Amino acid sequence: MAKKPTHVSETPATQFLRQHGVSFTEHVYDYVEHGGTSESSRQLGVPEHQVVKTLVMQDERAQPLIVLMHGDKQVSTKNLARQIGAKSVEPCKPDVAQRHSGYMVGGTSPFGTKKEMPVYVEDTVLALPSICINGGRRGYLVGIAPSVLSELLKAKSVSCAL
C-alpha cells in the first residue's frame, strides 16, 4: 500500500500560520468518520491529551465561539457559560459550524476561520509542551506550541473540562 504523503496542500489554517511566521509540523493520518481525537492520536502515536479539538459552539443569542479542548476531555457547557458570562452555551449544528468556520466538521481549525469568533482554551492545554490541532482538513493535524493560541488567536483561558 502506498504511504500517505507527509505534505498536504495549503489550507486557510496553514496560510494563516505561515503569514504570522508560526513554525509548525504537519501530521497526516487516515481520517475515520466519527473516529475523533482517539483515532488521530492512535495513528500518530501522540497522547490524546495533547491532541486539541476545535469545537464551534454558540451562546443563547446564537453568537458563535470556539472552544479548544483536550481530545480526551469533554466541555462542561454550564461551567463554560458561567465563565464567559453567557446564560447558556451549546454546540452548533454541523452545517452552522461549517458556515461560521469555513471548514468541514472533522477538519475544523481555529486558524483562518471564515468568521472571526472569540476563542476559549482549556487552561491546562496551555501548560503542555506542544499540541497537535487540526490544520484545516480532515486527516491533517499541525503541531504547534500552545502559546500560539493565546498570542495569535487571543484565546482566553477557561476551566471547563470534564
Image (tube, rainbow, N blue to C red):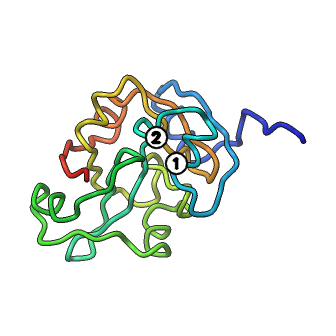
Q: Where does label 2 land, which residue?
A: 48
Q: Where does label 1 land, which residue?
A: 38
Q: Nearer the viewer, residue 82 or 110?
A: 82
Q: Give amino acid for label 1.
A: Ser
Q: Residues within 10 Å of mark 2 (few under 14, many from 20)?
A: many
* 31 sits left or right of 130 in the view: right
Residue located 61% across and 47% down the image: 11
Q: Quadrant of residue 140?
A: top right
* 42 sits left or right of 1 in the view: left
Q: Are marks 2 and 1 in contact (CB under 8 Å)?
A: yes
Q: Nearer the viewer, residue 52 or 98?
A: 52
* 105 sits left or right of 126 in the view: right
Q: Position of residue 17 (x, y in %)?
A: 50, 35
Q: Please tell me which of labels 2 and 1 falls first in the chain.
A: 1
Q: Position of residue 8 (x, y in %)?
A: 70, 40
Residue located 29% across and 69% down the image: 58
